[in-house]
Image: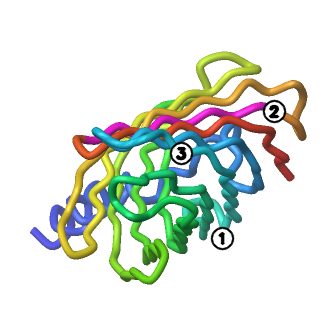
């Protein structure tokens, strides 16, 4: 009976010991053009910065910063800058030879003019090495400030080589969408 309990415990623990996919790199920085399209408001242009650093085979820390110029004259927000910050911890594990499961939690902050708020986010998704020079991912992200929002996040990267690529991200939710595209430096 004790032997069966040990075998069962080992079988249940084994999926957590699977190493992340070697083709997917969690060490990168990227800077890109940001386009936000809030519902029923003017579009906003800005810049976005993303970074990630692996902490061993299955964990990574990540961060991000977005800046955009708000142009909403009817809401008395014309000429106001919007800043969004994110810092978090991620878990990644291989679920096949080319696909990782990714789970993330993060502290989030938003500053728009005189308004600011802190919150958190949680995200689950997959990241896949679709081809030797292309990867793609999809995730569901829950963000909670005063209210909450759930979004679908789609991303991809075309790799010119093992160091340089171009990445794109779309964050789609009921309050509006945002898009980011720019170069990625992997290390």
Q: Position of residue 107 (x, y in %)?
A: 43, 77
Q: Main secondary structure of the magenta part?
A: strand
Q: Quadrant of residue 147?
A: bottom left
Q: Residue at x 67, y 35 (%)?
A: 181
> Any magenta on residue 171?
yes
Q: Residue at x 69, y 41 (%)?
A: 33
Q: Is residue 172 visible to the viewer in this orientation of the structure?
A: yes
Q: Which residues are magenta?
A: 166-173
> Mark 3 — residue?
44
- Viewer-nearest of discs 1 and 3: 3
Q: Residue at x 43, y 72 (%)?
A: 106
Q: Is the image coloured rainbow, by chain, by secondary structure, or in one colour?
A: rainbow
Q: Which mark is residue 55?
A: 1
Distance in Å between CA atoms under marks 1 and 3: 35 Å
Distance in Å between CA atoms under marks 2 and 3: 25 Å
Q: Position of residue 21 (x, y in %)?
A: 61, 41
> Mark 2 — residue?
165
Q: Secondary structure at mark 3?
A: strand
Of residue 166 and residue 92, the one placed in the foreground of this image is 166
Vertical placement of residue 117 versus 123, above or below: below
Q: Which mark is residue 131?
A: none
Of residue 25 and residue 10, the one placed in the foreground of this image is 25
Q: Secondary structure at mark 1?
A: loop
Distance in Å between CA atoms under marks 1 and 2: 22 Å
């Amino acid at each position: 009976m004790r032997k069966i309990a040990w075998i069962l415990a080992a079988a249940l623990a084994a999926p957590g010991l699977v190493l992340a996919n070697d083709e997917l790199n969690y060490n990168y920085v990227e800077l890109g053009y940001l386009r936000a399209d809030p519902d029923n408001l003017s579009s906003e242009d800005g810049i976005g910065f993303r970074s990630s650093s692996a902490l061993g085979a299955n964990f990574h820390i990540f961060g991000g910063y977005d800046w955009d110029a708000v142009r909403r004259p009817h809401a008395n927000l014309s000429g106001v800058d919007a800043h969004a910050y994110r810092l978090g911890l991620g878990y990644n594990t291989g679920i096949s030879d080319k696909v990782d499961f990714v789970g993330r939690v993060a502290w989030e902050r938003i500053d728009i003019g005189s308004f600011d708020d802190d919150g958190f986010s949680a995200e689950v998704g997959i990241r896949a090495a679709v081809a030797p020079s292309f990867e793609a991912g999809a995730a569901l992200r829950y963000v909670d400030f005063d209210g909450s929002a759930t979004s679908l996040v789609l991303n991809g990267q075309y790799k010119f080589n093992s160091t340089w690529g171009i990445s794109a991200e779309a964050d789609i939710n009921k309050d509006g969408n945002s898009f980011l595209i720019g170069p990625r430096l992997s290390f």
